[in-house]
Image (cartoon, rainbow, N blue to C red):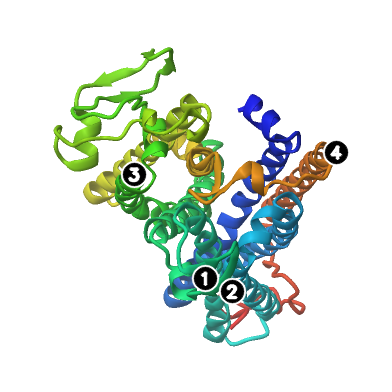
Amino acid sequence: MVAAAAGAGSEVLPARVQMATTLGFHIILACMGIAFPTVVLVAEFIGRRRSDETALLLARRWSQAMGVLVAVGAITGTVLSFEMGLLWPGLMRQYGAVLGLPFGVEGLFFFLEAIFTAIYLYGWRRLPGWAHFWTGVPIAVSGIGGAMSVVAVNSWMNQPGGFTEQAGRIVAVNPWQVFFNHAAAYEMPHMIIAAYMVTGFMVASVYAVGILRGRRNRYHYTGFAIPFVLAAALTPFQLLVGDTAARSIASDQPVKFASMEYVARTGSDVPEYIGGIFVNGRVYGGLKIPGMDSLLVGFSTDTRVVGWESVPAAERPPAPWLLHLAFNAMVGLGTLLLLTGLWALVVWWRHRRLPRQRLFWLLAVVGGPAAIAAMESGWVVTEVGRQPWVVYGLLTTADAATTSGGVVGTLSIIVALYAVLGAATIVILRTMARRWRSSETQQPTVPYGPPPGPPSQPLSKVGT
């Protein structure tokens, strides 16, 4: 990969690293922006529907954390928008007329999300109970709409279409076909469900830590159950969507799929490898399952799977071992999360309670980082697997990258700034958590709220 980048231009590799760094950081915040509003709304809905003071308290506190994460996500998202033009001028010069629509729609959804986030935070104790709840719905809807818009761009880069090009210029664009391109059918649900899994398992893992530390009270169990149930319920659907996506990639981007699955030569009865490193035509350290790859692609071991030798070496993704291991990590971690959810479901079905075994709560703690790792691994597969193309089959990454110098310098600055930003975000959230724990017996605060009612006023009446 380094050699290829050096041959194409000295700025290609640092540009890719900078984009990967900023995207890898921002996508975690983007997941929270997409799904956390729904988690907050579920807590508020339960609180108002059942007059559950614990759920309302969680909703109030989570909304404060949501405000912090939306603000930080706005910063990192703005950096990414500038990078599209600064790092990849060839892409925007050639296909900016195509990509302008989904990016513009994403901007509208972001403004709606920001506006209603402010109304929701400011509306605690100022709006009637259910009126306040409904001001949060546009936040959740806007998060999903913004995610669809951004994924529309990425999926179009994997399966371009919906435009007419003459003499190297875009002369006509079909917005519908651009936005809902062929790859969007599986990329959009895959990303949105991933966002809900990352958010749900991550928030749940915080309360699982508290439970393991002895805070076995209704507040912590409710704080765990609401996001965990949402994420666990979506996990089986994510595996189904992922299975559909893999077969679509085998058809639409066969060389990417071949790199994901170590298929060097085209043939049938192709084996599946779990783990392992491909070196000089052999896989070392992997578990080989004969015929399984063909069976997964076409439901028959006779299914023909295209190998990466079908194209010249320059048109193959770099580092097949990275793609393969990232794909295995995504599937393996997703399966672990599925089993954790099934464990909770079985115990609830039989005993109407959560599991008491320490192993379950350890898995719940690991669930948050595992969901993030699975999501990041999926993006590695998507982005590295498309190489050497930035627009599949039409524009190479080398041709799209900037020819200006200084990318190594901006990369260094970005890494330093994001390290500070990430550390500051964690410190702020931990400070909020410590303040909440120290005031568990006091009147709950809300963001930007007027002075609370008298101490004797029931919590269910405050904010209604």
Residue 424's spot in the image, x, y percent? 79, 47
Q: Nearer the viewer, mark 4 or mark 1?
A: 4
Residue 91 is tagged as: none
Q: Are marks 2 and 1 in contact (CB under 8 Å)?
A: yes
Q: Is residue 292 above or below residue 241?
A: above
Q: Is residue 154 above or below residue 138?
A: above
The residue identified by callout 1 is 145
Three-letter residue code for mark 2: Val
Disc 1 to disc 3, how far (Cα)? 24 Å
SS of the residue under disc 3: helix
The residue under the point 50% across, 54% down is 195
Q: Mark 4 or mark 1, which has the lower sequence index?
A: 1
Residue 86 at least partly seen: yes
SS of the residue under disc 1: helix
Q: Mark 4 or mark 3, which has the lower sequence index?
A: 3
Residue 385's spot in the image, x, y percent? 48, 39
The residue identified by callout 2 is 105
SS of the residue under disc 2: helix
Q: Residues within 10 Å of mark 3 (few under 14, many from 20)?
A: some
- Tell me if 41 is positioned left or right of 20 in this view: left
The residue identified by callout 4 is 409
